[in-house]
């Protein structure tokens, strides 16, 4: 009798293990190939308010209910910034009707040469829905340190006089404002759009 109970218990455990394996397999099969680093659960993301083209204060908290894509750069950037912004614009085109569920914000880390109106105009070259903001160096230091973004002014020869070295990653915040995904610089527009579709469905 005792042996029979052990056998039944063992069979029950084996069945539960098999069901769990099937459930995990289904979950993994349902997870698409992601092109960025998915943060699960999302990390808390700092709210901030930087100056927009109309002089108002704008931050990711103003777009709750939408995904917010944050990129930190500057308008005189020769390569990383225009390439990333172009890819983001192409990703929005890929999203089609779902593009209105995403807000892209470009934060300039070169406030000396990038007044808010200039940053916003630059951002909108890549997609009309994009927003450009900036702030004082102290404000930017607070924001970038909160998001783990690096930037530093570097003196160079020539007319510009200096450039700004900065992180090339792009951050994605979820509908509730949590940091949900990080894209490396080489993420393609197709990869961005695919990841955004996944996050929109979540």
Image (spheres, helix red, strand yellow):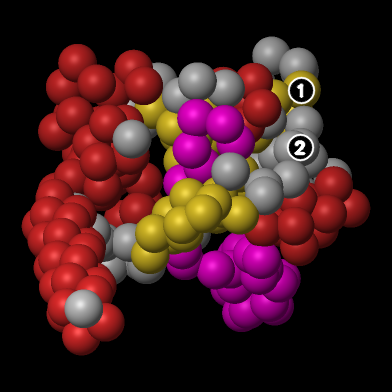
- Residue pointed to by mark 1: 57
The part of the image, by quadrant, that contains residue 181 is bottom left
Q: Does the magenta segment cover residue 168?
A: yes
- Residue pointed to by mark 2: 48
> Which quadrant does the N terminus fall into?
bottom left
Tell whether 13 sits left or right of 74: left
The part of the image, by quadrant, that contains residue 54 is top right
Residue 190 visible within the image? yes
Q: Does the magenta segment cover residue 176?
A: yes
For the record, the magenta segment spans 148-177
* Residue drawn at point x = 76 percent, y = 62 percent: 145
The part of the image, by quadrant, that contains residue 18 is bottom left
- Report x, y in % for residue 105: 52, 35
Tell whether 81 sits left or right of 158: left
* Residue drawn at point x = 38 percent, y = 64 percent: 37
Residue 195, placed above or below residue 182:
above
In this view, the mark in front (1 or 2): 2
Question: N-terminal of the two: label 1 or label 2?
Answer: 2
- Report x, y in % for residue 160: 61, 63
Q: Residue furthest front?
A: 1
> Which quadrant does the C terminus fall into?
top left
């Amino acid at each position: 009798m005792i042996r029979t109970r052990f056998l039944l218990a063992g069979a029950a455990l084996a069945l539960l293990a098999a069901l769990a394996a099937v459930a995990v397999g289904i979950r993994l099969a349902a997870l698409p190939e992601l092109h960025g680093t998915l943060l699960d659960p999302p990390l808390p993301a700092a709210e901030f308010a930087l100056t927009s083209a109309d002089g108002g204060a704008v931050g990711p908290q103003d777009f709750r209910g939408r995904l917010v894509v944050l990129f930190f750069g500057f308008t005189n950037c020769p390569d990383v910034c225009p390439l990333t912004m172009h890819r983001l614009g192409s990703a929005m085109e890929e999203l089609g009707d779902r593009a209105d569920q995403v807000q892209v914000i470009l934060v300039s880390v070169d406030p000396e040469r990038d007044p808010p109106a200039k940053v916003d105009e630059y951002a909108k070259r890549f997609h009309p829905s994009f927003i450009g903001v900036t702030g004082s160096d102290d404000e930017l230091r607070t924001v970038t340190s909160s998001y783990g973004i690096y930037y530093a002014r570097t003196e160079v020869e020539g007319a510009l006089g200096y450039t700004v070295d900065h992180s090339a990653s792009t951050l994605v915040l979820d509908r509730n404002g949590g940091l949900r995904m990080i894209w490396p610089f080489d993420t393609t527009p197709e990869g961005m759009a695919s990841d955004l579709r996944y996050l929109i469905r979540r």
